[in-house]
Image: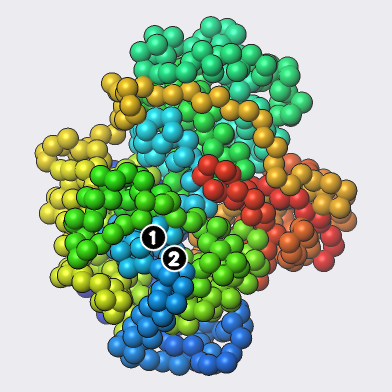
Amino acid sequence: PNTETEKSVNSVCPFCGVGCQLEYRVKDEQILYVEGRQGPANEGRLCVKGRFGFDYIHHPHRLTKPLIRLPNLPKGLNVDPANPLTHFREASWQEALEVAAQGLNRLKSLYGGESVSGLGSAKCSNEEAYLFQKLIRQGFGHNNVDHCTRLCHASSVAALMENIGSGAVTATFNEIENADVAILIGCNPTENHPVAATFFKQFARRGGKLIVMDPRGTAMKRFASHMLQFSPGADVALLNAMMHVIVEENLQDQHYIDKHTENWMAQKQHLQRFSPEAMAPLCGIAPAQIRDAARTFARGKAGMIFWGMGVSQHVHGTDNARCLISLALMCGHVGRPGTGLHPLRGQNNVQGASDAGLIPMFLPDYQSVAEEHAREAAESLWGDGVKLSADKGLTVVEMMDAIHSDDIRGMVIMGENPAMSDPDVAHARAALARLDHLVVQDIFLTETACFADVIFPAAAFPEKTGTVTNTNRQVQMGRKAVESPGEAKEDWLILTELADHLGLNWQYGSVETVFTEMKRLMPSLDNISWQRLESEDAVTYPCHGEELPGESVVFADSFPRSGGRARFSPADLVPPDEVPDNEFPYIMTTGRQLEHWHTGSMTRRSRVLDAIEPTANCSLNPVTLKRLGINAGENIKLVSRRGEIVMQARADTGVAENMVFVPFAYVEAAANLLTNSALDPYGKIPEFKFAAVRLEVA
Ligand code: SF4
C-alpha cells in the first residue's frame, strides 16, 4: 500500500541484462516493496527477482566497516560471513586504504606493475567500470583488467567485432514485435531473461514462427513452431546444415549479400560439405527438421536471432556465433525493423562495463589498446604523464594461471566472485590463496572476499546513483533509494580514495563528473547527457540527436568495418575439449535458475527468493534417474576430473538422457568445482557448457 511509504525512487533492476525500470517504495531507509515502471525494455513488467529480490541489502551479513586480515591465518573459505571477525579485524577507512595501497605499491616496486591485476564487475555502474579500468591501466601500466563478460559473451563479442564491426546487439529484443520469424538458440529466457521472454511469448501468440534450438528442452519449447533439441556441442554442425539448405534451395537474399557483405563465395563453398544428411548424426536432428527450420527462417520477411550462453560458453563459442551472424546475413535479416542479431546479455551492466573499457584488449568504446591514437586520446585526457600499454592484457582465467606462475602477486577485485564463478574453481581458489595481497570491495563477505587481505564495504545497487546499459544498448539512470549501512561507500568513491592513496591525481567531485569524462572517450554516448538521463531515465545508443530516443535497429546502410561491409567467416567443426568416456560418461552443463542470480550472494540472501528455491539441485531425465536407481528429491553425487559435489536430484524431461544440468549459485555444491577451464581461442571464454562427469548414488 502506497500510503505506508515515505518516498518512491525510480531506478533499474540490479539483476539481468533486460534492464527493467522499477520504482523502490521506501520507509525509514528500508525498501518495503518494488513496482515495475514503463521502461523501454520492460513496459511495466518485472520478474520474480526484480519484484522480490531487493531485501538482500538489509541482510545482517552486510559489510559495514573496512576489514583487515588477521596475521598468520590460512586463507580459504573457512570464514563465516556472519562473523568475519574470526579472521579479520575492523579498521578505519584511512588505515584500510593505507594498508591496501601500500601492499599494492610494494608489489609494483618489487615485481613491476604487471604483478597487480584487476577484476571489475558488471554489477557496478558505467562510471565505476570506467574508473576501475582507469585505476589498473593508469596505476599499474598494463591492461590486465577484465570482468565477467569473459565468462558470458566474450566469444559472441569476438565474432560480432570480427564480422560486423560492433560487439553490441544490432536490434533491441523488443524489435521482435516487427518480426515474423525468430530463432532462440542456446538461451533459456523464461529463467534468465524472464521479461524478454514475455515479449517472445507474445510474438508466438500472434503467429510469429519461433524456432527454438537447444540441447535442453526449456519452457520456450511450449511456444515454439519448431523445436530442435540437438546434441550438446553440435551447434556448428546444425547451423552449417541449415545454411547448406538455404544455398542448395537458393533461398538466400543475394541482393543483400552482394550489397552489404564480403567473403560470400568462400562461405558458399565451405557449406557444400555440411548437408543435413551428413550432419544429422552429429546433431541428433532429422534432416527434414533441419530443412524445415532453414526454410522457415530464410523465407521470413523479417527475422531475428537471439542467443545465450549455450552458444557462447564452448571452446567453439566464437565459431557458433560466426555461424549465427552468417545465417542472419545470408537471409538479409539485419538492419531493418524486425531483423537483427541479439546476444542476450547476462548481467544488468555487462554491456556498459564492456563499453567503458573493462576488458583487457580495448580502451573505452572498443578502441584497441594496440592503436596509438586511442592510447594517446586516453593519455591526454587522463594527464599527469600517463603512459598506457599497447599490449593486450590477461583475461579472467588467464589471470588465475598467472597467479600460479607468480606473474601476478596482487589483485584488486570489485564486486566479482571468482571463487565461485571461475571454471575449475578449486584452481581459482588456490590462486586467490596464493596472492601476496588481495584487495576486495563488495557488499558481503563473498567467497572471494574470504581470501582478501583488505576488504572495503561497498554500497549496494539501490544505495547509489549511476548509469547502466542493458542488453538493448539502453543507457539508464540508476538512482539511490536508501543510505548504505554503517560505513559502506559507493564503489566509485572507494576507487577515487584508493587512487589517491596510490598516488594518482584524480579529481572527481561527483559521479556525474566521471560520466562527463567518460563520454569524452566514448562517441557512442554522443547526445546522451547526464541531464537527459536524469529527466528521461533511458536513452538508446547510438543516438543522433538530443531530441531523439536513439536507434533501436542499426546498420541499415553499412557496417562499422573498413569498406562498410559485414563479413562471412566460415566455421568448421571443433569437438568439445572433454568428451565423455567410460569413466565419465555423462555431459554436465551449467546455468542459472529463475530465482537465483549467478553465485547466489544476493538472491540467497533475499528472503522470498531463497524461500522459493532454498536447495542446491540439479536436473536429470527421469530415465537417467531410474537407470541410476535414484528417486527425484534424493541426493546425487557428481564427479568430474576436477572435483565432486553432492546435491538434490530433480526430474526434468527436457534434459537429455546423457546430460545433467547444474545451476552454479550454490556454494555448498559449487558447480564450478567440476567445470572445465579449457578456453575458446578467440573470446577466451571457458567451456562451462560441456564437462564429462560420473553420476553416483550419494
Ligand atoms: Fe530484473 Fe531481469 Fe527480472 Fe527484469 S527480467 S526484473 S531486469 S531480473
| Rendered location of residue 698, percent (x, y) | 82, 66
**Mark 1 sits near ligand 1, with its Cβ under 8 Å away:** no
Q: Residue at x 52, y 52 (%)?
A: 151
Residue 312 coordinates in the image, percent (x, y)? 55, 42
Circle 2 residues within 10 Å: few <14, some 14–19, many ≥20: many
Q: Are marks 2 and 1 in contact (CB under 8 Å)?
A: yes
Residue 482 percent location from the top left of the image:
27, 73
- First-in-chain label (2 vs 1): 2
Q: Is residue 294 above or below residue 695?
A: above
Whether residue 357 is situated above or below residue 225 in the rendered picture: below
According to the picture, the residue beneath numbered tag 1 turns out to be: 142
Amino acid carrying label 1: it is His
What residue appears at the point 18 percent right and 43 percent down from the top-left corner?
526
Residue at 74 percent of width and 29 percent of height: 282
Q: What is the distance, in whole Å, between disc 2 and disc 1 at their CAs?
A: 6 Å
Q: Which residue is mark 2?
A: 114
Disc 1 on helix, strand or loop? loop
Q: Is residue 226 above or below residue 431?
A: above
Q: In front here: 540 or 7?
A: 540
Q: Is residue 50 in view from this perspective?
A: no
Q: Label 2 sits on what residue type?
A: Glu
Query: Where does the image place residue 414, in percent across and percent down from the top left?
Result: 41, 68
Residue 94 appears anywhere in the view: yes
